Image (cartoon, grey):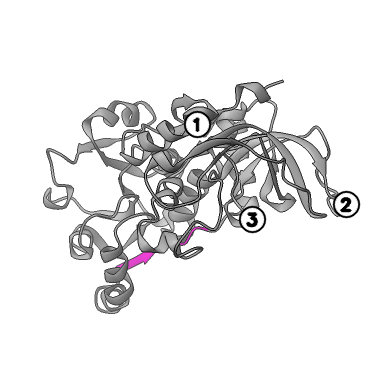
């Protein structure tokens, strides 16, 4: 099979399309013929080995040679212990917790990572959902307690997580303000944003507006900037951002909560099959639509990762394996 492989940290030039063996199947695994796989910020981070946390699996060289976590495809074979999935089923899921390997024609993964794809959902739409959708859901519902929030701000709203978060927040009845670059604002308005801010022209922390919940996808500011624009008992949830902000949240977050009742927290990514099913139901009922910006082929994975990593994506970037569509 063909796979996009890398053996050392670096820029996209360390990625190489190679012919390798189809992975062997363990008793609790499923062999999936991949039709589509989406690109996430973790692919960009793991490729470069930056920030430092991205090297925890391998300090000097990557632990996994094939990136790609959010897959969608058709089951080709099942292990002896698998009972809830059959050969021929169309499935999708986040395989980051069981070995990665999505930028390839086939992947062998733990069956528990997979959710059955509805017929109404394309493979591209299915691949766009798992990681970004679950991060948005867990950040808003679990960490952010969105049911208590009337005014929500999403910082970095124009990417994959942000576009899902906007739609989910609107389902909970929130008034949503989205912050991103000018080129992404029309997309955000089209999917329901109540207010949009071009961060290159306006500082949302200096507008005199206050929020019950801030979901932060980019995390480039000081903890004190975010605290200043939170309402009393407001919540701040960081999904992505700088190492310095992570340290601030870990060291100062508990103190801020104790003195001002403003909760400043970090969301730890937890792939969750139940959450994937919840998002699937939202899709089926027409309440959630993946926003897909660009589609690339397997040989174009370096360009796809570069495009997302440089912050250009409006929604999700998806790699489509045309030869696997039959």
Element type at mark 3: helix
Q: Earlier in the sequence, mark 2 or mark 3?
A: 2
Element type at mark 1: strand
With respect to residue 232, does 175 lie above or below?
above
Could you tell whether 64 is left or right of 181 in the image? Answer: right
Q: Are marks 2 and 3 in contact (CB under 8 Å)?
A: no
Across and down, in percent, residue 326 comes to: 72, 20
With respect to residue 123, does 275 lie above or below?
below
Q: Which residues are magenta?
A: 262-269
Real-space Cα separation, disc 3 to disc 1, in angstroms: 21 Å
Q: Hey, which quadrant is residue 181 in on the image?
A: top left
Q: Which mark is residue 98?
A: 3
For disc 2, the marked residue is 80
Residue at x-position 30% and y-position 70%: 247
Q: Residues within 10 Å of mark 3 (few under 14, many from 20)?
A: some
Real-space Cα separation, disc 2 to disc 3, in angstroms: 18 Å
Real-space Cα separation, disc 2 to disc 1, in angstroms: 32 Å
Could you tell whether 126 is left or right of 317 in the image? Answer: right
Q: Which mark is residue 318?
A: 1
Q: Are marks 2 and 1 in contact (CB under 8 Å)?
A: no
């Amino acid at each position: 099979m063909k796979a996009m492989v890398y053996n050392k940290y670096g820029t996209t030039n360390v990625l190489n399309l190679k012919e390798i063996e189809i992975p062997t199947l363990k008793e609790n695994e499923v062999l999936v013929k991949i039709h589509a796989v989406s690109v996430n910020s973790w692919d960009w981070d793991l490729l470069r080995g930056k920030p430092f946390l991205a090297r925890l699996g391998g300090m000097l060289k990557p632990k996994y040679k094939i990136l790609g976590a959010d897959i969608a495809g058709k089951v080709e074979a099942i292990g002896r212990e698998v009972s809830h999935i059959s050969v021929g089923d169309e499935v999708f899921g986040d395989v980051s917790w069981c070995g990665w390997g999505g930028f390839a024609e086939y992947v062998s993964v733990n069956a528990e990572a997979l959710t059955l794809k509805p017929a109404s959902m394309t493979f591209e739409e299915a691949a766009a959902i798992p990681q970004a959708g679950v991060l948005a859901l867990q950040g808003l519902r679990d960490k952010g307690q969105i049911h208590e929030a009337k005014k929500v701000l999403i910082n970095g709203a124009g990417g994959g997580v942000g576009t899902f978060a906007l739609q989910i927040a609107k389902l909970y009845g929130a008034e949503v303000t989205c912050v991103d670059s000018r080129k992404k604002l029309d997309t955000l308005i089209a999917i329901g944003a109540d207010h949009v801010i071009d961060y290159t022209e306006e500082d949302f922390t200096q507008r005199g507006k206050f929020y019950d919940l801030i979901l932060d996808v980019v995390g480039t500011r000081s903890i004190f900037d975010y605290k200043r624009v939170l309402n009393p008992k407001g919540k701040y949830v960081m999904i992505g951002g700088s190492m310095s902000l992570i340290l601030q949240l870990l060291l100062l977050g508990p103190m801020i909560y104790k003195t001002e009742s403003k909760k400043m927290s970090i969301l730890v990514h937890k792939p969750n099959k139940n959450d994937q099913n919840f998002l699937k139901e939202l899709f089926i009922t027409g309440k959630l639509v993946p926003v897909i910006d660009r589609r690339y082929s397997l040989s174009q994975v370096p360009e796809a990762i570069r495009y997302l990593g440089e912050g250009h994506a409006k929604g999700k970037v998806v790699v489509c394996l045309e030869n696997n569509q039959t």
